[in-house]
Image: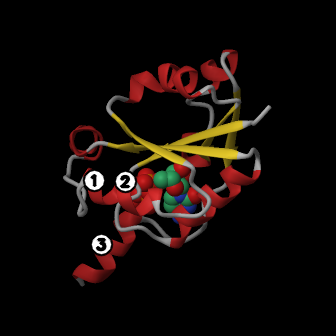
Amino acid sequence: MSKTVITFGTFDVFHVGHLRILQRARSFGDRLVVGVSTDALNENKKGRAPVYSQEERREIVAALSCVDETFLEESLELKGAYIQRYGAAILVMGDDWEGRFDALSELCEVRYLPRTPAISTTEVIEKIRV
Ligand code: CTP
């Protein structure tokens, strides 16, 4: 039986930290499903609109060879429902979220992975702006 891994993120201004966590997530199973957060969710969460639209961000993530399926994540509260919908055995999150999703370990294994140091979308935007 195939083992599905699920992860979530904005993946705006796609960078190598995004690529590495997706590749590592995929290595834990044989199918990777990625929830790409909607523009509306980001405006609420980060207080700014993403540079690239949800359709563009999803198109970029979906084109990666390590990604098998994508969907739009409409709400942070629905992670449990998404895990069940896609039959995920493992939830992968960056360790910036350490501990925040432990309650979901009732549904599947929860793994927090170390972030790639010294890069983030926010930093890239700042660097280009200067
Ligand atoms: N991520 C990572 N290493 C980085 C940046 C992000 O492993 N250097 C991971 C995050 O932990 C998350 C996924 O990539 O699991 C998507 O993160 P996202 O929030 O979209 O990217 P950030 O670069 O952190 O964006 P921002 O600066 O807007 O918060």
Reply above or below: 62 against 106. Answer: below
The circle on residue 58 is 2
Verify CB contact (< 8 Å) between mark 2 and mark 3: no
Residue type, label 3: Ile
Between the C-alphas of marks 2 and 3, the distance is 19 Å
* Mark 3 or mark 1: whose residue is earlier in sequence: 1
Verify CB contact (< 8 Å) between mark 3 and mark 1: no
Identify the residue at horizontal 64%, vertical 25% (top origin): 102
SS under mark 1? helix
Q: Nearer the viewer, mark 2 or mark 3?
A: 2
SS under mark 3? helix
> What percent of the width, then of the height, locates residue 115?
61, 58
Q: Nearer the viewer, mark 3 or mark 1?
A: 1
> What percent of the width, then of the height, locates residue 77?
41, 22
What is the quadrant of the C terminus in the image?
bottom left
Residue type, label 2: Arg
SS under mark 2? helix
Residue denoted by label 3: 125
> What percent of the width, then of the height, locates residue 43?
21, 44
Quarter of the rendering containing residue 75 = top left
Residue denoted by label 1: 55
Verify CB contact (< 8 Å) between mark 2 and mark 1: yes
Residue type, label 1: Glu
Between the C-alphas of marks 3 and 1, the distance is 20 Å
User: Total of numbered circles in the picture?
Assistant: 3
Viewer-side residue, 20 vs 66: 66
What is the quadrant of the N terminus in the image?
top right
Viewer-side residue, 70 vs 46: 70
Farthest residue in the right direction? 1
* Mark 2 or mark 3: whose residue is earlier in sequence: 2
Disc 3 CB within 8 Å of nearest ligand 1 atom: yes
